[in-house]
Every structure is written in C-alpha cells, then in structure tokens.
Amino acid sequence: MENEAKEKLLQKPSILGENVYEEEEDSLKKRAWKESKKMWLIAAPAIFSRFATFGITVVNQIFIGHTGSTELAAYALVMTVLVRFVTGVLLGMASALETLCGQAYGAKQYNMMGVYLQRSWIVLFLTTLLIVPIYIFATPILVALGQDESIAQEAGKVSFWCIGIILAFIVSFTCQMFLQAQSKNMIIAYLSAASVCIHVFMSWLLTVKFNFGLSGAMTSTILAYWLPNLGQLIFITHKCPETWKGFSFLAFKDLWPVVKLSLSSGAMLCLEIWYTTVLILLTGNMKDAKVAIAALSICLNINGWEMMIALGFYAAASVRVANELGRGSSKGAKFAIVISVLTSFAIGFVLFLVFLFLRKRLAYLFTPDPDVADAVGDLSTLLAISMLLNSVQPVLSGVAIGAGWQSIVAYVNLACYYVVGIPVGVVIGIFFRLQVKGVWIGMLFGIFVQTVMLIIITFKTDWDKQVEIARNRVIKWAAVKTKESNSSTTNP
C-alpha cells in the first residue's frame, strides 16, 4: 500500500518540486527578492499578532493594578509562573504542527493538513487535562513554595479564571500554525488588532465603569483570547476549502508520531522559555535583590518586546523551510534560511546600536527609581548584546521546527542553558560577586553557545536527506489515506 502511494506521489510535480529548477536558475537578486516577499508575508503578521497578544497582558496589568496591589501581585505571580509554564508546554507541543503542516503544504498534499490540525487538538487537549489540577490547587502549591498567603489566596482565584485562557491556547496556537503554513496569517493580525481594542474597552467597562474588579478584568481577558479563536475557526472552515475537509475519524488514527513530535517540540521550547524564570529566581537570592530583580525584569521586558520581532522570523523560517522541504527543494530550503537569518540579524544589529546609545534612559519608562535606572544602565551593554544574539538564535530554532529536529534542539537547549548558562551565571554572579550582571553574562554565554551549535548543525546538515525525510512523512500519510479510500470503495 505504501509503495502504491509512493508511486502516485512521485508522479506529481509537487513532490519533486514544481518550478524548483526554473527558480534556481533565476538571478541571485531576483531569488532574494522573491524569498523576501514570501518571508515577510509570514513574518509581518506574526510579529504584529505577537505584539497584540503581548499587549493584552499589558492592558490587564494596568487595569488590575488599579483594583489593588494584592490583586496585581497575584495576577503577576500566576502569569509569570503558572501561565508561563503552560504556555511553554502548549506552544512547544503545538509547534509540531508547523513541521507537519508546513511540509504537507509544500508537497501540495493539502487534504492532510486538516487532519494534522485535529490530531494536534486531541494531543494538546489531553495534555491540558493533566495540567488543570495545578490551577485548581494553585493556592496550596504557592503557599508550599513560600509565597505570601494573602497573595496566594488571591492567586488561587486568578488561576481558576486562567483555565479558560489555557483552553484558548489550544485553539489559538494550533490555528495560527495551520494558517501560517499556508501564508494565510494576515487574518490573525486583523483578529489580534480587533481583540486588543475590544479588550481595552471591556476592561474599562467591567473594572472601572461597573467596578467588577479582578473578576471583570479576567472576564475581559478570556473574551480577548477566545474572540480571535472563533474568528480563526470560522475562517478555516469557510475560507480554506483545500486544506480543511471537515472533521475526520482519521484524526484518531496514527496519533503516536504526532505525540512524539509534540513531546520533543514541547521539551525544546519549555527549556528555552523557563530559562529566564530560573535566572530571576537566582537573582532573588543576591544582595540588594529588590533592585537587582527590578533591573533584570526591566531588561527582560525590553528584551521580550524585541523577541516579538525575532519570533516573527522564527515563524517565517519554520514555514519557509518546511514548505521548501515538502516540495522537494533542498536548495530552496537553504536559501530561505540565509534570507531569514540575514534579515533578522540586520534588524537586530540596528537595535543593538540603539540600545547601546540609550542605555539607562530606557529604564525611566518603567521606574522613577534612580538606583534601578543605574542598574539598568549598567546592564545596557549586555542587553544590547542579548538583542544581537536573539536576532539569530530564534530563527535557527525556527529552521529546526521546519525540518523536524525538535528532539535534537531539545538536547542542545538542555546542555547550553542548564549545563552551561545557569552554572556560569551562578559562578560569575555569586562567587565573583558581579551580582545580576554575572547572571546576565551567564545567560548570554548559554545563548551564544546554543547559537554556535545551531549554526554548526544547520551548516553540517545534509539537506537532500531532509527532503527525503519530509517526502517519506508525506508518503506514509498518503498510504494511510489510500488504504482508507480503497476500504471505503470495497465496502460501500
């Protein structure tokens, strides 16, 4: 059955790469222009939607901050610990869909993409069911971790509301990746913009006008996450006729490969996302921890905004590499990597110069405290270097997602962040008494080693072999589809 599917697929120009050789004969300038257009078509909406999603959290902090300091502390605690934890798990596991859908779309095997989407929903929903008890028992967990009891009690209320948010993540992350694989993610940007506007109005209405406090703010937050999801689902079911063929029982078959890829994807991103959380905990054990944490948090906040740009190129790189591998062009995949990395690096270099110039002036956007501002100024060089490194590293991680190397990169992240970065940060920060600067140097060292290793892996990769791996993945799925089709024909 698999041989039959293979013969059918190999006869199609989509597997061998339609117009691959013609495109490779174009001039370098023309190829670069074409690839840049394809890349920005994915990157620009991805960057905007990430900024908008980040904005929902900022709006929440503003309105909850006016309800009370305890409520604000509880919200911050839940969002930075519990929600960050789950975001890492679900976003990581959902990134498996980028590999599967991206390669399927490149191979023009459109009908498999809807099944992959449904399989991802099943895997992520079952994972979320295992995580929900953490939110139900958030208060005793936080008290056991040494948090203030009054804050932990309020955090328990916030965490119940957050169950609706993490369920929204299942639909949000998977639908975004499904649409990105088809370069149809402009709709995501429109929906994100509308969601932020509605969120601002609803937050004001429920917390200020009707004085519902924390409950009003969290109600608005859940709406802000679910309204774009409804829009995406409507768009997929009505505007993606080639890739969405309706619900299928195939979604419940052959789930294990999706589970394995999802687990390795989750490990890859979780190790990366949790890295900064560990560093903040380390900083809290240092001298003058209040100023140190405030300074590091401001730097990480600024770095987080810049990361929204880098993550847009992460998405573009993963989709473009997966598409090119799926359509059978190893040279196209390599060229997409070069264009994505160079473009992101150029933007990162500009930001590197800007933040070297601004230094501690940036801190006054976040705090009036001169001690904190001085500490931020002292870290500004490291912040600028971090932005330069972050302009390359996420793009290479996107390449890994597109090629399906999640398990390899998970080991790289584990070694670079937790075997190299954190120990170096502890030694320099505590034993050499450089305090928060030492922690930051450790983080940068881990990111630098990771970037070098990813460059080596990308450079040493046999991309023709990656094309074969992508092709075999498509052929295997097509064999299952052919078997089902033959079965339905013989048993009407």
Image: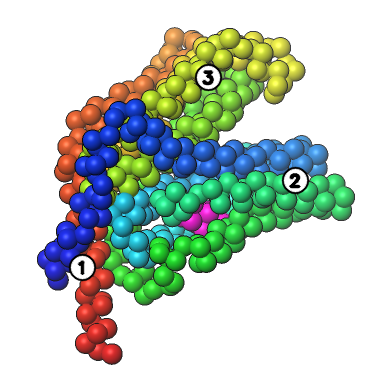
Q: Which mark is residue 200?
A: 2
Magenta stretch, main secondary structure class: helix
How many other residues sit within 10 Å of disc 3, few (<14), some (14-19) or many (≥20)?
some
Hey, which quadrant is residue 359 in on the image? top right
Q: What stretch of residues is rendered in magenta?
A: 167-176
**Front residue of this view, candidates 263 and 146:** 263
Q: Which residue is mark 1?
A: 479
* Residue 460 is covered by the magenta coloring: no
Identify residue type, mark 1: Ala
Q: Which residue is mark 3?
A: 351
Q: Which mark is residue 216?
A: none
Q: Assign a secondary structure to mark 2.
A: helix
Mark 2–mark 1 Cα distance, whole angstroms, equals 50 Å
Which residue is drawn at the image coordinates 33% and 71% (left, top)?
250
For this view, does 92 lie left or right of residue 232? left
Q: Assign a secondary structure to mark 1.
A: helix
